[in-house]
Image (cartoon, rainbow, N blue to C red):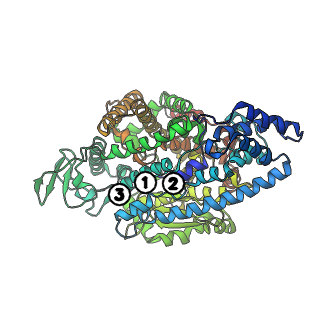
Amino acid sequence: MKSKLILITIGLSMILISCSKEKQTMSIPEASIGEVINYLSDQGVVDNSDLMERGVRQVAKLWLPEDGTNEEFVSFCKKNYISDPKEKHEVFLRISYYLETIYGNYNEMVLGLKLHQDEPIGELYSIDEFFSGYSPSSHLSDDFYANKIAFIIALNFPEQSLKEKEALTERKDWAYARLGDIFTSRIPADVLQNAANAENEASLYIDSYNIYAGHLLDKGGNLLFDENMILLSHWNLRDEIKANYSQSEAGLSKQETIYEVMKRIISQEIPSEVINSGEYEWNPYTNLVFQDGKEVSFTPESTVRYEKLLNNFLALQKVDEYTGNTYIERNFSENMEVSVEDAISLFDNYLSAPELKDVARIVEQRLGRKLQAFDIWYDGFKPRSELDEDKLSEQTRKLYPDASAFEKDMPNLLIKLGFSPDRAKYLSDRIEVDAARGSGHAWGGQMKGEKAHLRTRIPSEGMNYKGYNIAIHEFGHNVEQTISLYDVDYYMLNGVPNTAFTEALAFVFQKRDLELLGIKDSNPDKYAMDVLDKAWVLIEISAVSMVDISVWKWLYENPNATASELRDATIRISKEVWNKYLAPIYGIEDETVLGIYSHMVSYPLYLSAYSFGQIIEFQLEQYFNGKNFTEEVDRIYKLGRLTPNAWIVEATGKPLSAEPLLKEVSKIVNAKK
């Protein structure tokens, strides 16, 4: 499912987490910079000469001719450098208050502008697309440079390197460092707005991409699914594959049919006429379309999917010239604070682990057949795989006929997880539940007093089990968002190091979804099943992350590519990653399933967050064992936005690694031999 920690426009997110290494011609000569540094040093009250010099040089780098003359630069720095530590801290608190006010209100504006796109409130009109794509914060950065606020912040709270941040010990210094991340580059408002428009158009396309499963034909031309079943790609298609592992032969036929649908979407051979439409019957095996029993002509979607991805690339590439680095570097080294090389190495080492072949043989034994490509979503290690999803849906529909019913039950759900009644009420009062037009997401607040939003798809007959499972996942996000906004000591530390860390808590919650329904897992092999499930899921999402990264690398190598060339490259890369890592495990080659993920189209390079989130979740679960779960969740998520390694060490006492998972897999596999 799609889950995002902070769903704000690209314009605002680029202000919150700015970019460094700007390639612009410095307008301030070294002599003027030296004059400022010497003057401030001669005052004898500089708290940290290295940070002072860095702040002066950062302002000089950002200062353009339209900002003033050399003399005005010198005068500005002399006047606005804060030498007194007490005054500096007071100014820091003022800035934090002002930024919280601005970010929070912009967030509320974006929520309102995207209301009809995100929630199923009537038909979507073209005017909705225009408003939802508007980024009200796109001029904020320009304004802050024009009124010199950006320069005051950069001068007194300059950017610090990842190594320097990880050497910090005081919470106040961490907060100062996060303020220093904000103004390190100047990106024009029109460039930010263009990026926001591209992301919004891609999201709108993805959120409205439904397959009418009740009109799908199997190999023999028979209808398989409930006539009213509508599945959003790729999330619901994937979840329907998961749901059919307990339905023997009929379930296998459904899974194979859905995989054929997926392959047609990836190749863009899917008929446009069957997207968001129940007017036709479609056989994805033959790719023939029928109406009233008669074959009719159709138009393949062709390249629309890849046009949206390409537009995102082109818009984000325009940001590169103002930052001096690529979006790949910005996403990993700066936003995630993990280098792309380290991410690739982590995924490569995990996917190459020999233990994974042993897990695959266990899956085959449990299935009683050879693995097929769609078995990347094998769900049989989870207790729900033994349950009838239709009966689960009956239960969830009765419990949650609409969004308000789930919202009212949130305190009870938290109490079941172990939170005290007062704490459960505190958290639930700060979360609002809405029906989602798409698959669902969690949208956090950006200022105290603002609620987080939990969104999941809720059909007219009530919340089915798929929607409930997603809702519990998003609930985990919302709890994190609430704790890390309301309970951190400094606003500039609100949030988590990167989106992987909120995904981790969402996975922790999601794993307890049946427990919250009162369904106990009495399996004596529960721990072993949990470990094997985690290992299997991590194969899937790590491989998909490798495809995502490889596609973006290809785009930078081929910046003038057409949408059709991107389509072909994505299919080729999907096969290459499959053949390198999964073919040795599955025993089949040239599968394209890794190219189906909707995130690749609408949420650039987000998929790696899921991989890291799975690893972090396993470390957290191991740490939670034998401890008070809810007390630890509160403690850990109050840490706020430290760097990834500092956070995981503070949280669990151990560095981030997939090795603990592989060691547990090895123990379980050896015990079964």
Number of labels in the image equals 3
Q: In this view, does 135 lie above or below 347?
A: below
Q: Is residue 570 above or below residue 516?
A: above
Q: Residue 127 at x, y = what percent?
A: 38, 64
| Residues at marks 2 and 1 touching, judged by CB atoms closer than 8 Å | yes
| Dot 1: element | helix
* Dot 2 amino acid type: Thr
Which mark is drawn over residue 9? 2
Residue at horizontal 19 percent and vertical 58 percent from the top: 280
Crowding around mark 3 (Cα neighbors within 10 Å: few <14, some 14 to 19, many 20+) is: some
Q: Residue 427 at x, y = what percent?
A: 64, 64
| Dot 2: element | loop
Q: Which quadrant would residue 592 be assigned to in this image?
A: top left
CA gap between label 2 and label 3 equals 19 Å
* Dot 3 amino acid type: Ser
Instruction: Give the mark, 2 or 3, whose residue is nearer the N terminus.
Output: 2
Q: Residue 278 at x, y = what percent?
A: 23, 61
Q: Which quadrant would residue 398 be assigned to in this image?
A: bottom left
Q: In this view, does 152 lie to the left or right of 277?
A: right
| Dot 3: element | loop
Residue at horizontal 53 percent and vertical 69 percent from the top: 407
Q: For marks 1 and 3, give the one nearer the viewer.
A: 1
Q: Is residue 18 left or right of residue 562?
A: right
CA gap between label 2 and label 1 equals 8 Å
Residue farthest toward the left in the current orientation of the protein: 294
Q: Mark 3 points at which residue?
A: 208
Crowding around mark 1 (Cα neighbors within 10 Å: few <14, some 14 to 19, many 20+) is: many
Q: For marks 2 and 3, give the one nearer the viewer.
A: 2
Instruction: Give the mark, 2 or 1, whose residue is nearer the N terminus.
Output: 2
* Dot 1 amino acid type: Asn
Q: Name the residue under label 1.
A: 200
